[in-house]
Amino acid sequence: MALIEVIGDDNYVLIDDTFKNMIFAEKKVVSFPVVGGTYSGSVTTVSYTSTEESFPLLAINSSFLCSQTRCTRSGNTWTWGLSCNSSGVGQSAEVYIFHIPQAVPDAGGLLQLFNGSESIVFDSNLKYMKMEKQLFMTMDNATSTAVTAGRKYAAVHSKLPAFYSLLQGSMSCGPNFRAVIEQSQLNGTSMANGSVSSASYILWSREYCAAPPFPSGSYRTKDGLCMVIDVTGL
């Protein structure tokens, strides 16, 4: 049993000698270049190197719709793919990276908790991830949630809604060909003072003439979820 427990107003234990939480590791600013061509939005990547074995989380703060599309690992380096809508082209966003350490570092906090092995499990000087609420995302409708005005928030995309389609187009292609519209659509999040919002946007689209057999079909992940976290002061 823990020698010290920190209990919240709802009588649940918040911190004891088994405490684990993600710790703020790094903040980066990412830019979204002009891609052009079939892209109405933009894509970019951001990387983070760490010897920790646990999976890091990336949270995005942007004033325009922005999405985390993938995460890959090569050795000790994690790389995320990001995309944005047309309003973010040429603009930048902030990303916040969090990680659970294998061994909690001694940050010299006024309050420290140790387990039975005399290892630190909590240090009040560390910057722990603070989840504010969840935001449901859907391809069908824009959604939003109210947050405390004057504070800064970022979104961790737990599951991202997406839509890819190959549909018949309208351009003239002659008697033996057919017009095809190929399109990629995503959901993203954006932040404003007092709210966090989600909506869908077209990342890229193209129309071309195809020979038989004519391609068609679609893939859709309609619904998704993100965590809204408080990054004020990070």
Image: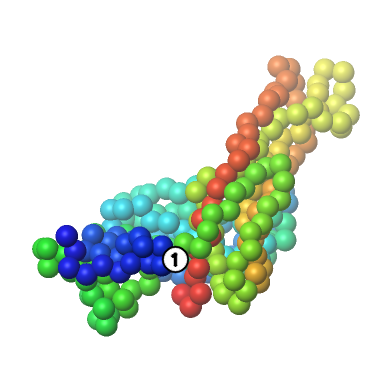
Colouring style: rainbow
- Crowding around mark 1 (Cα neighbors within 10 Å: few <14, some 14 to 19, many 20+) is some
Image quarter of residue 90: bottom right
Question: Where does residue 38 sit, x and y in percent of width and height?
Answer: 72, 46
Q: Can you say whether 172 is above or below 72 in the image?
A: above
Q: Which residue is mark 1?
A: 130
Q: Amino acid at mark 1?
A: Lys
Question: Where does residue 6 sit, x and y in percent of width and height?
Answer: 30, 69
The residue at the point 75 percent across, 29 percent down is 167
Q: Confirm whether residue 222 shows in the render.
A: yes
Q: In the figure, is residue 107 to the left or right of 194?
A: left
Question: Where does residue 128 sit, x and y in percent of width and height?
Answer: 38, 68
Count of numbered circles on the image: 1
Front-lying residue, 66 or 230: 230
Q: Confirm whether residue 81 shows in the render.
A: no
The residue at the point 30 percent across, 65 percent down is 15
Front-lying residue, 161 or 48: 161
Assign the N terminus to one quadrant of the image: bottom left
The residue at the point 65 percent across, 36 percent down is 164
Q: In the figure, is residue 206 to the left or right of 218?
A: right
